[in-house]
Image (tube, rainbow, N blue to C red):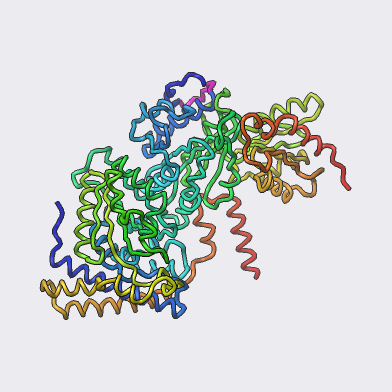
């Protein structure tokens, strides 16, 4: 694990300034700025204070913004979420962390029955500006329950919005956007990408944070992905380019709401699509994406939408996770099936 | 220090408890008449509910009820037609404004809002930056029952509250029954209050059918939290004299003789006898309060009769503060197909 860093000073300049940061550093910068700009923002969770989080995303924040605003809770996820709901009722903007995806399960009642419904139940009088950060997905050889992909579960719940950044810039911009929203956002951080670096510009415009983004333009086929799978799909696209296949990579970013227009525009152009996700296939978000594409592009599709996904198995142990997570070969096979598809 | 229970408090308790009794009895008949599909009566818990609610100041404090807190809601000034709207299946949670009344929406998940009270209470200390204000902290009071005490969230809430020294009062109505399961099969050790010792939370078990005792105990608990000493637990030992809900049949799990023996003297009768014995008010004044309660119940019945459905568009409009495009699309489709049909 790299050296932990003290939180960078908030960037308040009006001039855009690019700096190279890891995803972890970009998220740390975003939280630092959120706490500086919004006096009602709070960071809470297990080990987020003195330690700075097990992934160091909250490193230095308690020292800088005070132990009242960045605080450790007892080790109980339902408590963290339930407390965040009460804090939101008291006018705060909590940013709770659940330390690993699999430990969101103990908080399901509070997330599904309470967080997602309080605005509705109270007829809009008790809004829930809560951003739940969840280190998500696999790829780090972690113990059981430390590598789950819960996006379909969250996206299925009315009243929640779901987003997943794919790189440092996305992490910075999307977290700042999520924290400003008056509704609950599940923020799924690809933990296998925490230490990958990229340029981060601290300017913001609505276009930077709303809907999907084209991570790589192309014209023969659209790869749809989110989180950690985006950079893998870009790798695949570079490989395919050597064979003259020009692939567009659409970084979906928002998993609820899904940017149907961006899907229609991209696949309307390429006429072929492969959806890639780590989560199990059955009832995964790939099915939702495929259906949106079919609704919008049925007449122009050259082949059925292909899914390259995890399997309908419990997330395997580290030795087998490379077999489970869509790898470059499996994604290339998926692309091949679409390109070689013949009608009838 | 807390105000001792004054003669005027006894009369106020009676005025509210008789109103609650009339509303509660009326609500069962409204269900039998088909005016509301279902109702969870609080018969027998009037002293626990009104006594505790009178100890909080809803101008500044915040109340987190379950689904059986008609008495609490009435004592806290919630409009009873808006309260009953949830039982008329108009809107889950009720139609009143929780932000204005400081009474949270009806909570159907047992122990679902206990943690919310802890969070809200912790927020009060954050707002005060850890310095107890001259007028003390605003206090959260959360209601739960013996059944709810089995939920893990209650443990998490009590532990969090003690760790953060949150100004929250856990008000437990131990009414003897969680639907069909008696307290002895629900609460190991026989007392929820006894668990306070493990968390370092001061706790008291009180006769929940003695309104003045409940009021005094809850005032002490609120004063403790207000002064910045952290959470407190009040366990009011009461009795659910009616069914769990209008769909329940207590005859399948307890006999009428058992109900009579376990229920003891009606808390309303006990309060009336005490008021008359202490000459806090005369019988005519109490009879007038009874009549006033009956008239109120009748007015609420008329209000419920007149209460119409909410527009279907609210299904979509109230999910988010900022609705998604997909939700707006679904709403437009729903509207178009509804209009067409």
Q: Is residue B171 magenta?
A: no
- What x and y, as percent, mark residue B163? 32, 40
- What x and y, as percent, mark residue B234? 27, 55
- What x and y, as percent, mark residue A4? 46, 21
Furthest-right residue in view? A344
Looking at the rendering, the stretch of residues picked out in magenta corresponds to A13-21
Q: Is residue B180 left or right of residue A143?
A: left
In this rendering, the answer to whether B48 lies above or below B62 is below
Q: Is residue B150 left or right of residue A323?
A: left
Q: For this rendering, which residue is in front, A219 or A133? A: A133
In this rendering, the answer to whether B267 lies above or below A278 is below
In this rendering, the answer to whether A200 lies above or below A113 is above
Q: Is residue A14 magenta?
A: yes
Residue at the image position 20 percent from the left and 71 percent from the top: B271
- What x and y, as percent, mark residue A208? 57, 35
Residue at the image position 28 percent from the left and 42 percent from the top: B165
Query: Is residue B157 among what the camera can see?
Result: yes
Q: For this rendering, which residue is in front, B224 or B135? A: B224
Residue at the image position 31 percent from the left and 47 percent from the top: B121
In this rendering, the answer to whether A36 lies above or below B316 is above
Furthest-top residue in view? A3
Query: Is residue B97 among what the camera can see?
Result: no
Q: Is residue B250 left or right of residue A185?
A: left
Q: Choose top left, top right, bottom left or bottom right for residue A281.
A: top right
Numbered label tally: 0
Q: For this rendering, which residue is in front, B337 or A137? A: A137
Q: For this rendering, which residue is in front, A154 or B245? A: B245
């Amino acid at each position: 694990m790299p050296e932990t860093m003290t939180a960078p000073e908030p960037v308040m300049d009006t001039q855009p300034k690019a700096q190279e940061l890891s995803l972890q550093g970009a998220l740390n910068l975003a939280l630092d700025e959120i706490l500086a700009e919004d006096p009602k923002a709070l960071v809470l969770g297990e080990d987020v204070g003195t330690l700075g989080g097990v992934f160091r995303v909250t490193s230095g924040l308690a020292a800088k913004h005070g132990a009242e605003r960045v605080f450790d809770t007892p080790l109980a996820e339902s408590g963290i979420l339930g407390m965040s709901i009460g804090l939101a009722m008291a006018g705060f903007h909590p940013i709770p962390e659940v330390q690993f995806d699999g430990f969101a399960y103990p908080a399901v009642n509070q997330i599904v029955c309470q967080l997602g419904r309080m605005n509705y139940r109270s007829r809009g009088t008790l809004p829930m500006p809560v951003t739940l950060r969840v280190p998500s997905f696999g790829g780090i050889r972690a113990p059981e329950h430390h590598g789950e992909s819960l996006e379909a579960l969250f996206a299925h719940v009315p009243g929640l919005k779901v987003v997943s950044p794919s790189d440092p810039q996305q992490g910075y911009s999307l977290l700042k956007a999520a924290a400003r929203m008056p509704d609950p956002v599940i923020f799924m951080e690809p933990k296998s990408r925490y230490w990958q670096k990229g340029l981060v510009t601290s300017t913001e415009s609505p276009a930077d944070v709303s809907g999907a983004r084209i991570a790589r333009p192309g014209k023969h086929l659209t790869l749809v992905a989110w989180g950690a799978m985006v950079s893998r799909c870009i790798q695949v696209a570079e490989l395919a380019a050597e064979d003259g296949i020009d692939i567009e990579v659409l970084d979906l970013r928002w998993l609820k709401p899904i940017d149907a227009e961006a899907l229609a525009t991209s696949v309307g152009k390429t006429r072929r699509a492969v959806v890639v996700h780590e989560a199990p296939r059955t009832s995964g978000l790939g099915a939702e994406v495929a259906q949106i594409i079919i609704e919008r592009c049925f007449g122009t599709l050259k082949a059925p939408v292909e899914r390259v996904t995890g399997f309908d198995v419990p997330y395997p142990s580290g030795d087998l996770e490379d077999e489970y997570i869509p790898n470059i070969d499996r994604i290339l096979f998926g692309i091949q099936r679409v390109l070689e598809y013949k009608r009838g | 220090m807390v105000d001792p229970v004054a003669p005027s408090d006894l009369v106020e308790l009676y005025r509210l408890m008789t109103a609650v009794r009339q509303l509660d009895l009326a609500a069962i008949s409204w269900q039998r008449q088909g005016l509301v599909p279902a109702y969870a009566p609080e018969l027998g818990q009037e002293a626990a509910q009104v006594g505790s609610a009178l100890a909080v100041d809803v101008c500044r404090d915040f109340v987190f009820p379950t689904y059986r807190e008609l008495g609490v809601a009435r004592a806290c000034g919630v409009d009873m037609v808006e309260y009953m709207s949830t039982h008329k299946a108009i809107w889950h949670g009720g139609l009143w404004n929780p932000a204005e009344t400081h009474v949270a929406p009806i909570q159907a998940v047992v122990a679902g809002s206990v943690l919310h009270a802890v969070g809200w209470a912790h927020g009060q200390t954050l707002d005060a930056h850890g310095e107890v204000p001259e007028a003390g902290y605003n206090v959260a009071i959360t209601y739960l029952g013996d059944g709810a005490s089995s939920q893990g969230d209650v443990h998490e809430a009590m532990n969090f509250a003690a760790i953060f020294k949150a100004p929250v009062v856990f008000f437990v109505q131990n009414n003897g029954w969680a639907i069909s399961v008696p307290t002895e099969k629900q609460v190991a050790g026989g007392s929820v209050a006894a668990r306070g010792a493990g968390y370092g939370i001061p706790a008291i078990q009180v006769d929940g059918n003695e309104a003045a005792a409940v009021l005094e105990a809850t005032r002490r608990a609120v004063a403790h939290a207000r002064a910045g000493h952290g959470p407190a637990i009040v366990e009011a030992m009461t009795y659910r004299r009616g069914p769990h809900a209008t769909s329940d049949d207590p005859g399948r799990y307890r006999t009428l003789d058992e109900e009579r023996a376990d229920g003891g003297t009606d808390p309303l009768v006990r309060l009336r006898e005490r008021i008359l014995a202490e000459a806090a008010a005369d019988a005519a004044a109490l009879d007038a309060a009874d009549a006033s309660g009956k008239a109120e119940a009748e007015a609420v019945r008329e209000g419920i009769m007149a209460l119409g459905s909410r527009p279907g568009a609210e299904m979509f409009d109230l999910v988010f503060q900022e609705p998604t495009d997909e939700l707006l699309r679904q709403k437009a489709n729903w509207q178009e197909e509804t209009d067409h049909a």
